[in-house]
Image: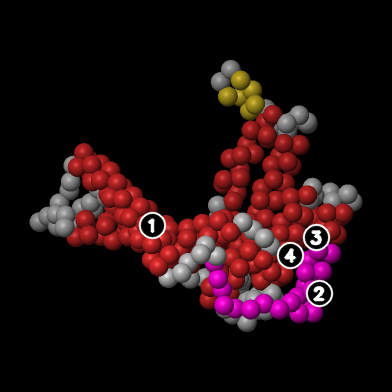
């Protein structure tokens, strides 16, 4: 809580950074959960059968992992952006969701390759007694890896954004995905936001009852106790939810009452995705 002292500026409590971090994570997950407004809109991908979409996106992701040309990846990403545009997915929302984090995390992985892959050197970098020299082959390989990851994640995000979560889970079962995997995925998706929301409530309750600044030791003890309390709540809730599901006849199968029917447009779309994927992979041999 912000303490007001006469003649001084407000002082932020020392748990402000924790509240902001958890609050930001919760807001992002809540935004992801409720992006089904895009899945319910009248777009090109929204009108396709979820099973056809799932198979088509899996084929496109596999093709992306086999592409060895930056030009081919750029063409494939252009097709992804065109599909997002036809599906009425906001451009800024879609691009930021992928590219704000991908270059950082994928870049960390490729940094060693830039310096240790053999090839023509770009420049010499002296770091103490050692000399590091990035190579052109390493730079091209790093850019290629980051591009592959970005396009693959873009495909996965576009699938999730344009498909209701329940339909996506049912499509996984239609492809003979193990039942326990689908069940765990469904429960995780539903309850991770619930527990983050509970954490936010605990932080807000603590802040509303705090006056002035607490000591660092007290803050650490409170955070440790809160983590244990939240874990205990999660364990108890898991038992209660499972018992309630069994009492209502749950047998382990996730059921969705919507029915699917493959139409000619779905088959044509699936064939088009397969043709584009094969063409992009073959184009790797001729494109730089």
Q: CA distance from mark 4 to mark 3?
A: 9 Å
Please report whichever mark, 4 or 3, sits nearer to the chain's N-terminal start. Answer: 4
Residue at the image point whose x is 64% and y is 58% from the top = 177
Residue bearing mark 4: 56
Question: Which sits earlier in the primary sequence, circle 1 or circle 3?
Answer: 1
**Answer yes or no: do the residues labelled 4 and 1 have beta carbons within 8 Å?**
no
Quarter of the image with the N terminus is bottom left
Q: Position of residue 202 (x, y in %)?
A: 26, 57
Farthest-out residue, bottom: 42
Q: Do residues under tags 2 and 3 come within 8 Å of each other at their CB atoms? A: no
Q: Position of residue 199 (x, y in %)?
A: 32, 56
Sort mark 4 into few (<14), some (14-19) or many (20+) by Cα contacts within 10 Å. some
Residue found 58% across the figure and 17% down from its top: 129
State the extent of the magenta-drawn residues as a range.
254-275
Q: Nearer the viewer, mark 1 or mark 3?
A: 1
Residue hosting label 2: 268
**Residue lying farthest to the left in this orientation:** 6
At label 1, counting other C-alpha atoms closer than 10 Å, the crowd grade (few under 14, some 14-19, many 20 or more) is: some
Upstream in the sequence, badge 1 or badge 2?
1
Question: Residue beneath label 3, please?
Answer: 277
Mark 4 or mark 1, earlier in chain: 4
Q: Nearer the viewer, mark 2 or mark 3?
A: 2
Q: CA distance from mark 2 to mark 3?
A: 14 Å
Secondary element under disc 3, as helix, strand or loop, is helix
Q: Which residue is mark 1?
A: 238
Residue appearing at x 74%, y 54% in the figure: 62
Closer to the chain start, of discs 2 and 3, is 2
Name the mark nearer the viewer: 4 or 1.
1
């Amino acid at each position: 809580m912000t303490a007001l002292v006469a003649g001084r500026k407000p002082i932020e409590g020392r748990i402000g950074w924790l509240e902001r971090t958890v609050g930001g994570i919760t807001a992002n997950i809540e935004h992801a959960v409720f992006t089904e407004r895009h899945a319910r809109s009248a777009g090109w991908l929204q009108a396709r059968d979820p099973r056809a979409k799932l198979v088509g996106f899996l084929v496109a992701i596999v093709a992306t992992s086999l592409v060895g040309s930056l030009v081919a990846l750029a063409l494939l990403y252009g097709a992804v952006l065109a599909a997002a545009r036809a599906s009425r997915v906001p451009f800024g929302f879609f691009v930021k969701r992928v590219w704000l984090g991908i270059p950082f995390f994928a870049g960390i992985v490729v940094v060693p390759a830039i310096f240790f892959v053999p090839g023509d050197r770009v420049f010499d970098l002296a770091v103490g007694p050692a000399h590091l020299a990035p190579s052109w082959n390493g730079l091209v390989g790093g850019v290629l890896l980051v591009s592959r990851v970005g396009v693959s994640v873009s495909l996965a995000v576009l699938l999730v954004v344009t498909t209701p979560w329940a339909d996506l889970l049912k499509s996984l079962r239609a492809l003979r995905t193990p039942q326990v995997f689908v069940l765990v995925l469904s429960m995780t998706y539903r309850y991770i936001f619930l527990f983050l929301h509970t954490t936010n409530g605990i932080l807000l309750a603590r802040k509303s009852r705090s006056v002035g600044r607490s000591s660092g030791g007290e803050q650490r003890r409170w955070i440790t106790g809160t983590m244990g309390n939240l874990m205990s709540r999660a364990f108890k809730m898991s038992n209660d939810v499972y018992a309630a599901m069994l009492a209502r006849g749950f047998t382990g199968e996730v059921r969705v009452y919507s029915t699917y029917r493959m139409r000619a447009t779905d088959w044509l779309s699936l064939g088009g995705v397969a043709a584009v994927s094969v063409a992009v992979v073959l184009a790797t041999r001729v494109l730089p």
